[in-house]
Image: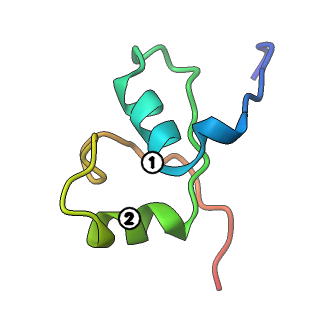
Amino acid sequence: MGQQTHRREPPERRGIVASEAVAKAEPDGYTLLFITNGNAVSASLFKSLPYDTLSDFAPISTVGFF
């Protein structure tokens, strides 16, 4: 990427809280969210989320298939 990267993963920034932070971040082209199937499950478990799972994120890669 040619840019310095910083990985931040304190305990309070996982799951829904992390997704909300990324969804509300300024679209600078450098903010990435690595999600798991937990994000997909959250959409069906909770009546409302502080973000829209389908429209607030843009997939850029697939890590693996099972």
Q: Is residue 36 left or right of residue 27?
A: right
Inter-mark Cα distance, 2 to 1: 8 Å
Give the image location of residue 53, x and y in percent. Answer: 30, 52
Density class for disc 1 (Cα within 10 Å; few <14, some 14-19, many ≥20) is some
Mark 2 and mark 1 residues within 8 Å of each other at the beta carbon: yes
Where, by quadrant of the figure, is residue 23 drawn? Answer: top left
Image quarter hosting the C terminus: bottom right
Instruction: Give the SS element for disc 2.
Output: helix
- Check the image and report above or below for 53 versus 1: below
Q: Residue at x 27, y 40 (%)?
A: 50
Q: Residue furthest bottom?
A: 66
In the picture as drawn, the residue positioned furthest to the left comes out as 47
Identify the mark at residue 16; answer none if there is no mark: 1
Foreground: 60 or 19? 19
Q: Residues within 10 Å of mark 2 (few under 14, many from 20)?
A: some
Residue 47 drawn above or below residue 57: below
Q: Amino acid at mark 1?
A: Ile
Residue topped by disc 2:
42
